[in-house]
Amino acid sequence: MIRVRTFPTSDAVARALAAEIARSLKANPHLILGLPTGRTPIPLYRELVRLHASGRADFGRATTFNLDEFLGIASSDPRSYRAFMRRHLFDRVNLRRRRIHFLNGAAIDSRAECARYERAIARAGGIDLQILGLGRNGHIGFNEPGRVLTADTHRVRLTATTRRANASLFGNRAREVPGEALSMGIGTILRARKIVLVATGANKGRAVLRTLCGTLTTRWPASFLQVHGNVEAWLDRAAASRLSAVL
């Protein structure tokens, strides 16, 4: 069962989760974090930077693995998810470069790149804490709805909805967003020891309801979080608004 934590605002979610991550880093300096991109985690990263600047969050021995990257986009491209993470977190805390792991969207052999990423996660000992956002169509990472889902890290075709959601990185032109990406698979995500799903805003209300209370189906990838034994949903009041009738 997914445990629900509700906060008054999105900023309150960010502050509380950042404090939780800081405590986890103190308890386990070698924490292995799985990290998302997108608009939702920006306040979280801002809070983590603030805690680091005040000496309350030390990333010096931590390791990170990001969920996904656009296919055909080099890590040096300012539109890449790697560049996004550098702007919002990596360049602003004391994470060591060799402990930052990212899929290479410009890899010539995408299948080999995905296999390399799976091996890197396994060699690190697996992900301790995986942070997830939630797409309005139920995607987590870039695992899009479909007849089947791929367990391990893989190449995926993005839906029009997901491309529109990422248009801000590409001059607000959805057609410029790459049509494919590399993403951790559902199985990769579910192997994390703990998962925190973050959703904020009223426009995520329906997605939250279906994720927590809907049928397990490949047509709604986030529904598979229901089978994990250690998942929490951290929501602001707006995102949780549709849950009152069922919880």
Image: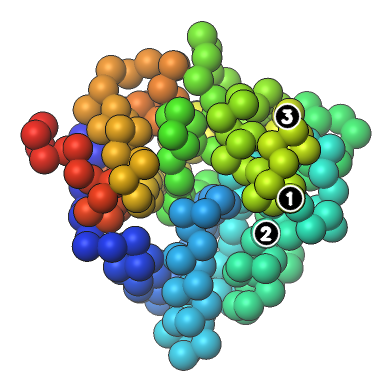
Quadrant where the image shows the N terminus: top left
* 200 sits to left or right of 64: left
Looking at the rendering, which quadrant does residue 98 occupy?
bottom right
**Mark number displayed over residue 180:** 3
State how far apart marks 2 and 1 are (Cα): 14 Å
Which of the pair 163/61 is nearer the observer? 163
**Mark number displayed over residue 146:** none
Which of the pair 187/160 is nearer the observer? 160
Mark 2 neighbour density, 10 Å: few (under 14) some (14–19) many (20 or more): some
**Residue most extreme to the front:** 172
Mark 1 neighbour density, 10 Å: few (under 14) some (14–19) many (20 or more): few
Dot 2 lies on which element?
A: helix
Which of the pair 217/195 is nearer the observer? 217
Horizontal and vertical percent position of residue 53: 52, 87
Residue sitting at 35 percent across and 67 percent down? 11
**Residue most extreme to the right:** 108
* 88 sits to left or right of 30: right
Q: Which residue matches tag 2?
A: 84
- Hey, what amino acid is under mark 2? Phe
Residue sitting at 29 percent across and 27 percent down? 210
Quadrant where the image shows the C terminus: top left
Residue sitting at 26 percent across and 50 percent down? 238
- Hey, what amino acid is under mark 1? Gly
Compared to residue 235, the image places residue 58 above or below, namely: below
State how far apart marks 1 and 3 are (Cα): 18 Å
* Figure disc tally: 3
* 56 sits to left or right of 1: right
Q: Which residue matches tag 1?
A: 171
Horizontal and vertical percent position of residue 127: 50, 49
